[in-house]
Image (cartoon, helix red, strand yellow):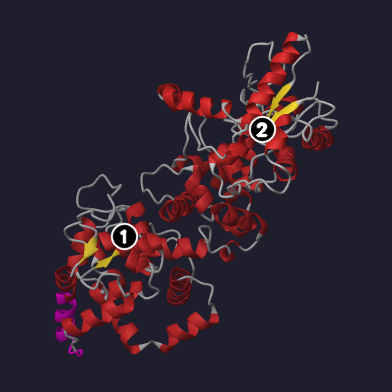
Amino acid sequence: MESITLDIELLQLPETSPMSMKSNQDFVKKLFDQWLALPETNRLVTSLVNDAKAGVALNVMCGGGSSGTNSGSNSPLASMFPARNGPPLSPRNSTGSPRITRQRTGLSNLSSPLKVVSDHVKELIPQFYFEDGRPPPNDLKEQCIAKINSLFYGHEDGLQLQEFKLVTTEICKVPSFFSTTIFKKVDTNNTGFVKREDFIDYWVKGNMLTKEITSQIFTILKQPDHKYLVQDDFKPVLQELLATHPGLEFLQGTPEFQDRYAETVIYRIYYYINRSGNGHLTLRELKRGNLVDAMQHADEEEDINKVLRYFSYEHFYVIYCKFWELDTDHDFLIDKENLIRYSNHALTYRIVDRIFSQVPRKFTSKSEGKMGYEDFVYFILAEEDKSSEPSLEYWFKCIDLDANGVLTRNELQFFYEEQLHRMECMAQEAVLFEDILCQLFDMVKPEDEGFICLNDLKGSKLSGNVFNILFNLNKFMAFETRDPFLIRQERANPTWTEWDRFAHREYIRLSMEEDVEDASNGSAEAWDDSLEVPF
């Protein structure tokens, strides 16, 4: 018996859903009657009935394919549309329509029930999130264990702290001043030794091996129950840095200033990296910052003053001496009258009032109306590097009197009025506010000509001068006169920030003043007097 093939597309029927067919049975009946009335259909049905009476097995295929030996051209249906004379099929849609993706299922063996079987194949998706880090591949794991075995060879009782430093640099590949912190993380029982098995449990089985270095450092520093870093988490590594770095060796005889140096480094880290300002440094913030690069630089560089980011001792020296100059009673607190003397009375009273109203940042000092050392570090970094985003955010909050997120003409005029008055008192050529307003808008080029928003300032290279014009008279005059010394310094060190240049100038000035004072006293015994700057 020849196989019979029926291609539904030859009928050129409109797309019809099963539900609509069930609800419109009259249409279906009419369609069937029309098909049955065709002469070819009559012959086909007659042939099938005769075959059924004779007991011949039926093999009817719907679609374009067949499985019989004499299929296709010999079927009665094929004679309905002779080759090359039939109507062309509608072009298949190439736009991704669901109509062309629907598959037709062939009907074979009419004696069996019609069933559409769809086997749901479960696709196994590999695990892509690991709370404790991705487990290391076997080859990487074996290589690491081989190195561990070589370093622990001959030390059955484990390694002591001094011997463990090689593990920190060779296996962990983090700065050497992390040795003590890692050692204590592994030696949980405080035995004074780290055994090979314990270190493998912490570093290899703890999946530290596959983490990138920022995540490794974050995990090493943080407390087990925290998902962030607090300031105290940095103290152990900074204490080891102070104890081991050749550029800080001279401070070992003055532990009180070792503590001040460590505090200053931490404050600088949080000023630049903890952008939320909540004291909780997250992994996301750590990855966005440059602290890890600075740590590696500090570990490799013998001259700590060349590590300009966070760790420079000269930068600490400038910050501490500036604070000491203003803190006349040396109670480690500064009030308004102290701060107004900063940089030869460069700041206006109005901006100092805004600082002490704690609008840009809440003071950590517990004494009302006074800022502590940490508050001063934030202030001086913001004041001397107005090109940085933390500084722009700091001063924007000060100028934004109504805290509506924009700086209006009235707010700009409020702060400039005092600048104008000071210029008149000093017999300087006064610049009217209308002219200054045009200059400010030309420098910032805000999207809206009616006000300046924070994003406008962040998008301008001259935004720092906007604030200098409003409340720092010394820097305003230097900008107007285009100080040639500052221009030469910028050209000499184009990669330096404004803070780097300021700290360099001030360190030279302070060093010269100290040399002059030592020469006038005939000795350098400045350490004995508690009221003198101890440097």
Q: Is residue 534 magenta?
A: no
Seen at 68% across and 11% down, the residue is: 112
Q: Position of residue 93 (x, y in %)?
A: 58, 48
Return the disc, 2 or 1, that comes first in the chain's sequence.
2
Q: Tell me residue 449's x, y (percent).
A: 24, 73
Q: Does 334 sit above or below residue 461?
A: above
Can the viewer see residue 314?
yes
Is residue 140 toward the left or the right of residue 399 in the image? Answer: right
The residue wearing badge 2 is 207
**SS assignment at label 2:** loop
Residue highlighted by disc 1: 394
Q: Amino acid at mark 2?
A: Asn
The magenta span reads 417-429
Q: Is residue 325 above or below residue 226?
A: below
Magenta span dominant secondary structure = helix
Q: Position of residue 445 (x, y in %)?
A: 32, 75
